[in-house]
Image (cartoon, rainbow, N blue to C red):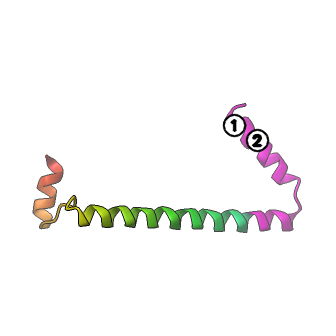
Amino acid sequence: MTSVSRLDQVLESIENLSVDEQETLIDLISHRLADRRCSEIAANIAQAQVEYKTGKVFRGTVTQIMDELRK
């Protein structure tokens, strides 16, 4: 089954819900997406802290950073 046909099935199921149920679904999905993004940000921060502590972070002036990026 392709992802498009799965999406079509989901959309059809959503259309069969009442307006209140659809609004609840929107709220639930919005909160879950926000939670997922928060988890991703926390993981990125943790990784950045590890890289900083192990000296894998380049520090310098804007000019030095731009020169490093051009390499």
Image location of residue 54, percent across then percent down: 23, 62
Q: Amino acid at mark 1?
A: Val
Q: Residues within 10 Å of mark 1 (few under 14, many from 20)?
A: few
Q: Residues within 10 Å of mark 2 (few under 14, many from 20)?
A: few
Image location of residue 44, percent across then percent down: 40, 62
Question: Magenta stretch containing residue 15, yes or no?
Answer: yes
Q: Which residues are magenta?
A: 1-25
Residue located beneath label 1 in the image: 4
Q: Residue at x 15, y 60 (%)?
A: 65
Residue nearest the viewer, comparing 14 with 42: 42
SS class, disc 2: helix
Q: Amino acid at mark 2?
A: Asp
Q: Residue at x 81, y 62 (%)?
A: 22
Residue located beneath label 2 in the image: 8
Question: Magenta stretch containing residue 7, yes or no?
Answer: yes
Q: State the image quarter where residue 64 is shown.
A: bottom left
Residue 15, compared with residue 1, is above or below; it is below
Determine the CA span between mark 2 and mark 1.
Answer: 6 Å
